Image: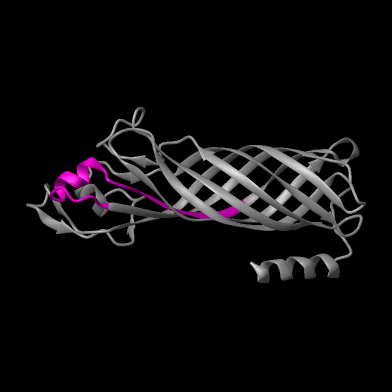
Amino acid sequence: MKKYLLVLVMLSFFTKGFSISDKVKLGLFVSPGIAWMKPMGSEINNGIAGLGLQYGVKVEYYFKDQNYAIATGLYGGMDGSGVHGRDTLTKLNGGKSVLEKYMTNNITLPVYLKLKTNPFKKKWRLYGEVGFQMVFNVSARANYSSSVPSPYLNNALINIYKENVMRDGNEVQQLIPGFRYQIFDFRLSVGGGTEYIINEKTSVFFAIHYNNGFVNVINDKSVNPKGDATVVRNILFTIGAMF
């Protein structure tokens, strides 16, 4: 984190300020945090937390007095999360619960309404953002805590390790029919932070965001996707610079 802060501060001081116009600003940021899965039904008992991360380019279009903006950009990122105690796997595993961990890499297109205060103490602003994120998973890997006997392969043990669960015919389907990780997720997002003004064109900012997924990310035939959906959520802490 200290390395990211140093890079952003150096960029800010050695850049005289660049913007497409007075209304449009560009920025760079990194957002580490935590991500977790939230099972909504009774088939899966608990969600597991892991690393959450976003990074990328921000674009902000400002309206009157620099207090209102439409913010978007192009983000990369990852979500490490999982579930524990799926009934289907517990039964196959002789009553022992199986921990399922998933790591996804994604590309995100955000849209926010951003509201900023006027400067106080000459250098500081507070701001809030509300909007949504369209998340496109480009890869998803699964790791299970133990090998599980497959009823479709004469109870042969299936070991799930770094398995690509976005492809059809993945090894998890030998345990859970039709299992695939979803490509698309839609998340509502809310957050806020503070901005420190270095000069007329350049500022650094610190923020926190909560992103709430609404898509059942695990597509399989062992659960009712409407009543037993599993969604992804994360809390991210952001440091960045606008130019």
Above-or-below relation of 241 to 227: below
- Please provide percent x and percent y for residue 62: 83, 40
Left or right relative to 58: residue 48: left
Quadrant hosting residue 222? top left
Check residue 230 for magenta coloring.
no
Q: Give the number of callouts.
A: 0
Residue at the limit of the structure toward the left, as seen here: 154
Left or right relative to 115: residue 76: left
- Please provide percent x and percent y for residue 170: 27, 52
Left or right relative to 194: residue 79: left
Residue at (49% x, 40% y) in the render: 185
Query: What's the image's color scheme?
Result: one colour
Quadrant hosting residue 112? top right
Residue at the limit of the structure toward the front, as seen here: 121
- Please provide percent x and percent y for residue 108: 57, 47
Residue at (90% x, 38% y) in the render: 65
Q: Quadrant of the N terminus?
A: bottom right
Viewer-nearest residue: 105 or 13 = 13
In the image, the segment drawn in magenta is 75-98
Q: Quadrant of the C terminus?
A: bottom right
Check residue 90 for magenta coloring.
yes
